[in-house]
């Protein structure tokens, strides 16, 4: 069976669409989670402060997203403690398409940084009390996690 020019163009377009990465697709396999215990203040907060807080911190919350406080980050459904492989945050920082990848400006997070974030999420995404896990919000944050 011979295809006419219109069918060939349509077929070619379908092949290109199937070959293109899906929105939010990662650039290959995810870097593995760091094997050691991860501490928020020592390991995670510096990554978030350097790459995320400019747009998603105390002074600015692009897309209504704030990452410097645990309750706000949990409400945004960026991650579920214990499940880094299913994490929207990890998909965003490892996106294959530069238009989808976070942070949008500057270099992408290194495999080691992504591994730290994955380990932190897998280990329960604990925040230190001085950095966004105020005592008055602990029961609320625990309930939010239980609801999901």
Image (cartoon, rainbow, N blue to C red):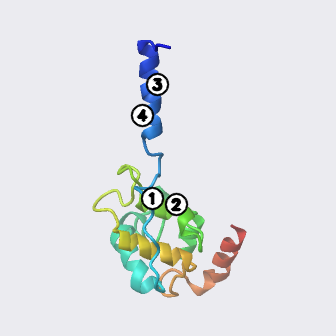
Quadrant housing residue 82: bottom right
The CA span between labels 1 and 4 is 23 Å
Tell me which label, 3 or 1, sits earlier in the chain.
Answer: 3
Crowd rating for badge 3 (residues with CA inside 10 Å; few <14, some 14–19, many 20+):
few
Disc 1 element: helix
- Which residue is drawn at the image coordinates 41% and 79% (left, top)? 45
Q: Is residue 86 above or below residue 141?
A: above
The CA span between labels 2 and 1 is 6 Å
Disc 4 element: helix
Crowd rating for badge 2 (residues with CA inside 10 Å; few <14, some 14–19, many 20+):
some
The CA span between labels 4 and 2 is 25 Å
Q: Is residue 87 left or right of residue 142?
A: left
Residue behind mark 1: 92
Tell me which label, 3 or 2, sits earlier in the chain.
Answer: 3
Residue behind mark 3: 11
The CA span between labels 3 and 1 is 31 Å
Residue behind mark 2: 88
Disc 2 element: helix
Residue 123 on image: x %, y %: 55, 80
Q: Residue furthest front?
A: 1
């Amino acid at each position: 069976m011979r295809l006419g020019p219109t069918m060939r163009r349509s077929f070619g377009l379908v092949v290109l669409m199937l070959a293109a990465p899906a929105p939010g697709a990662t650039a290959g396999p995810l870097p593995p989670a760091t094997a050691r215990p991860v501490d928020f203040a020592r390991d995670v907060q510096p990554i978030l402060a350097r790459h995320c807080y400019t747009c998603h911190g105390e002074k600015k919350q692009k897309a209504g997203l704030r990452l410097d406080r645990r309750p706000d980050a949990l409400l945004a459904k960026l991650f579920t403690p214990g499940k880094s492989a299913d994490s929207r945050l990890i998909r965003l920082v490892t996106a294959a398409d530069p238009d989808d990848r976070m942070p949008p400006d500057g270099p992408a997070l290194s495999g080691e940084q992504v591994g730290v974030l994955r380990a932190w999420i897998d280990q329960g995404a604990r925040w230190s009390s001085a950095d966004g896990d105020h005592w008055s919000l602990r029961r609320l944050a625990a309930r939010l996690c239980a609801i999901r």
